[in-house]
């Protein structure tokens, strides 16, 4: 963050305004137009019921502070996961304690602990070996889901051409400051709009 502030401080207002005009305004305008054009298609699409079971894998490194709310949101889903597996990827905080406490309470089915950090892919693969669901859902430890998120994701696989699906991402504390508000707008423009277009063209699950 400090490096970014230094760069901005050393940049002239003219260059900042020019960059905004050339890059950001067209990008955001196209994003808004895309949302307006394609949202009607998604609203009119019929609801698909998926009978597949979902295994949730939560790979995390030092994600102890957000792990409990994430698990709670998964337990409140309209389509309950068949299992939740937490992979502590060499964390140095309270991640393991939080995960083990959730397992003891019956909220988590399995906890896998790596002595050293192996990376997100290795953590997911370690859990995938034991997963028994038809579908695998990988979740960041600081993610809180809406109650119907898993059901909507699973429904995307009612189409046999769908090989992968993803959610839109929003900021939960967007009203805390101007910076979180701007981050929320950035997510809306760059992630939600982009995935809405991909939802129509080639992907599903937004």
Image (spheres, grey):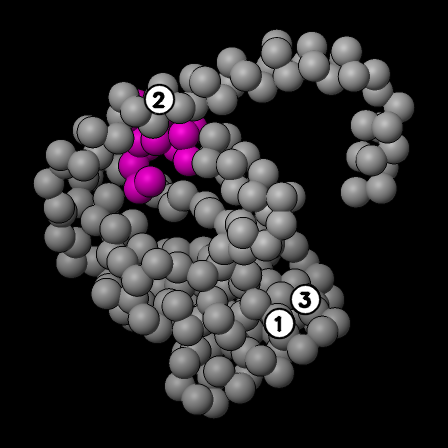
Q: CA distance from mark 3 to mark 2?
A: 37 Å
Classed neighbour count for the residue bearing mark 2: other residues with Cα under 10 Å, few (<14), some (14–19), many (≥20): some
User: Toward which corner of the image does residue 89 lie, by quadrant?
Assistant: bottom right
Q: Position of residue 161 (x, y in %)?
A: 23, 34
- As helix, strand or loop, the secondary structure at mark 1 comes to helix
Image point (13%, 34%), residue name: 44
Residue labelled with disc 3: 62
On screen, residue 85 versus residue 63, left or right, reads: left
- As helix, strand or loop, the secondary structure at mark 3 comes to loop
Residue labelled with disc 1: 64
Label disc, if present, on residue 41 of the rendered structure: none
Q: Position of residue 116 (x, y in %)?
A: 73, 66
Outermost residue on the bottom side: it is 104
Residue labelled with disc 2: 34
User: Is 47 a magenta residue?
Assistant: no
State the residue in front, 124 or 198: 198
Q: Locate the N terminus by quadrant.
A: top right
Q: Are marks 3 and 1 in contact (CB under 8 Å)?
A: yes
Q: Locate the C terminus by quadrant.
A: top left
Q: Nearer the viewer, mark 3 or mark 2?
A: 2
On screen, residue 83 versus residue 40, left or right, reads: right
**Is residue 132 something that shows in the picture?**
no
In the depicted structure, whether residue 9 falls above or below residue 83: above
| Range shown magenta | 192-206
In the depicted structure, whether residue 170 falls above or below residue 138: above
Image point (47%, 84%), residue name: 103
């Amino acid at each position: 963050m400090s490096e970014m502030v230094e760069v901005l401080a050393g940049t002239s207002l003219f260059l900042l305004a020019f960059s905004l005009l050339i890059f950001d305004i067209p990008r955001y305008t196209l994003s808004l137009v895309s949302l307006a054009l394609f949202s009607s298609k998604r609203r009119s699409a019929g609801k698909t019921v998926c009978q597949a079971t979902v295994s949730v894998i939560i790979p995390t490194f030092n994600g102890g502070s957000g792990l409990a709310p994430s698990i709670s949101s998964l337990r409140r889903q309209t389509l309950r996961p068949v299992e939740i597996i937490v992979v502590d990827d060499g964390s140095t905080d309270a991640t393991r304690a939080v995960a083990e406490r959730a397992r003891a309470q019956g909220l988590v089915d399995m906890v896998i602990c790596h002595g050293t950090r192996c990376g997100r892919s290795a953590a997911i693969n370690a859990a995938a070996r034991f997963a028994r669901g038809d579908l695998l859902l990988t979740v960041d430890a600081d993610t809180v889901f809406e109650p119907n998120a898993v059901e909507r994701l699973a429904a995307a696989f009612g189409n046999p051409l769908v090989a992968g699906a993803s959610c839109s991402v929003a900021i939960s504390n967007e009203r805390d400051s101007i910076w979180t508000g701007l981050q929320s707008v950035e997510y809306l423009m760059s992630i939600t709009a982009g995935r809405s277009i991909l939802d129509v063209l080639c992907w599903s699950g937004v």
